[in-house]
Amino acid sequence: MTIESIFEFFGVPAVLPRESSVLKGFELAKEISVSEGTPLFYIDNAEETAQSINSLKQTKVLADCMGMTGGPEGNLGHGARHSLRVAVDAGAIVIIESSRMCLTPERAVAILRLVQTAALLHDIRRSAPHHAEAGAEAAKSILKELGLPEDESEIICLSIASHEAFRPYEEPLDPEAALVCDALYDADKFRWGPDNFTETLWLMLEAAGIPVEAAVKSYPEKITGIEAIKKTFRTVTGRKYGPDFIERGVRIGEKVMEGMKKSMGME
Ligand SMILES: [Fe+2]
Ligand SMILES: [Fe+2]
């Protein structure tokens, strides 16, 4: 079972940039990412990833949330495809951590549902200046409308409000709430690895009308922030596999930028 099966299930199409130089970078990145192989997280945790995908397909509240996450290209490259990827990985992290924390199967399933709901809604206000806080506010009304109990909604909103990198963060004292917050954060930051170059970067450039040349020039300074995220993973699982995602992404990024420099005559 792959991530593509979940895109298909929810009717989320593949995205292709329209502008020719952005499309060129996008295609080059796809090609290079294949040669970098699969991140270790999916190799070591294939069963948990499959369970997480199954849960996404079977939970009604999640299907309800899907209608609200914007189109596949919406939200500056943080639309439905990004949210679904975060939901699959956050769910798998919760499954792994729940067994490490010896939670009962009932609690593990409940937390899995909470984190996947949070993942689908976490970037719902991606264009707002403080998108995590704004997203939490928006999620609160949506979850009320969907009839979620207040205590569950509170945990989901807390995790959305605290998913941004390099911001002060105080882990909740309740271990289950902490697991939701930390799993959402880690799964979202896994996206700073290969996904950053195979999808998000190009969709952001196109949405913002930024030329590829400018992205290539600012790459060395951007990469410092990406490297710094390696130290911020919060769960045991995130700390174990997060750096592999990031290092893989940086290797792809470097090769893509070299390739783009050559093709644009920037050397
Ligand atoms: Fe975000
Ligand atoms: Fe995100």
Image (cartoon, grey):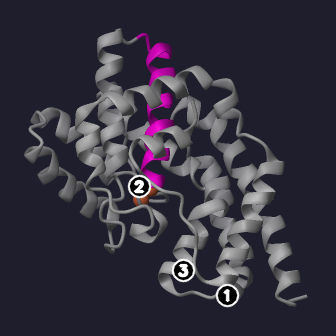
Q: Residue at x 42, y 51 (%)?
A: 83
Residue linked to disc 3: 206
Residue linked to disc 2: 80
Check disc 2 and give the amino acid type: Ala
**Whole-percent x and y of residue 166?**
49, 59
Q: Residues within 10 Å of mark 1 (few under 14, many from 20)?
A: few
266 relative position to 238: left or right: right
Picture quadrant of residue 249:
bottom right
Tell me where the magenta segment starts and ends, as one range: 81-102
Q: Residues within 10 Å of mark 2 (few under 14, many from 20)?
A: many
Query: Is residue 154 at all visible to an observer of this figure?
Result: yes
Badge 1 vs badge 2, beta-carbon distance below 8 Å: no
Q: Residue at x 12, y 53 (%)?
A: 141
Question: Quick one: SS at disc 2?
Answer: helix
Q: Earlier in the sequence, mark 1 or mark 2?
A: 2
Q: Earlier in the sequence, mark 1 or mark 3?
A: 3
Picture disc at residue 62: none
Instruction: Estimate the spatial distance between the alpha carbons at disc 1 and disc 2, rounded to whole Å.
Output: 27 Å
254 relative position to 233: left or right: right
Q: Earlier in the sequence, mark 2 or mark 3?
A: 2
Residue 96 magenta-drawn? Answer: yes
Check disc 1 and give the amino acid type: Ala
Q: Residue at x 18, y 41 (%)?
A: 154
Picture quadrant of residue 70:
bottom left
Badge 1 vs badge 3, beta-carbon distance below 8 Å: no
Picture disc at residue 214: 1
Image quarter hosting the C terminus: bottom right
Check disc 3 and give the amino acid type: Glu
For the residue with label 3, is its CB less than 8 Å from the closest atom of ligand 2? no
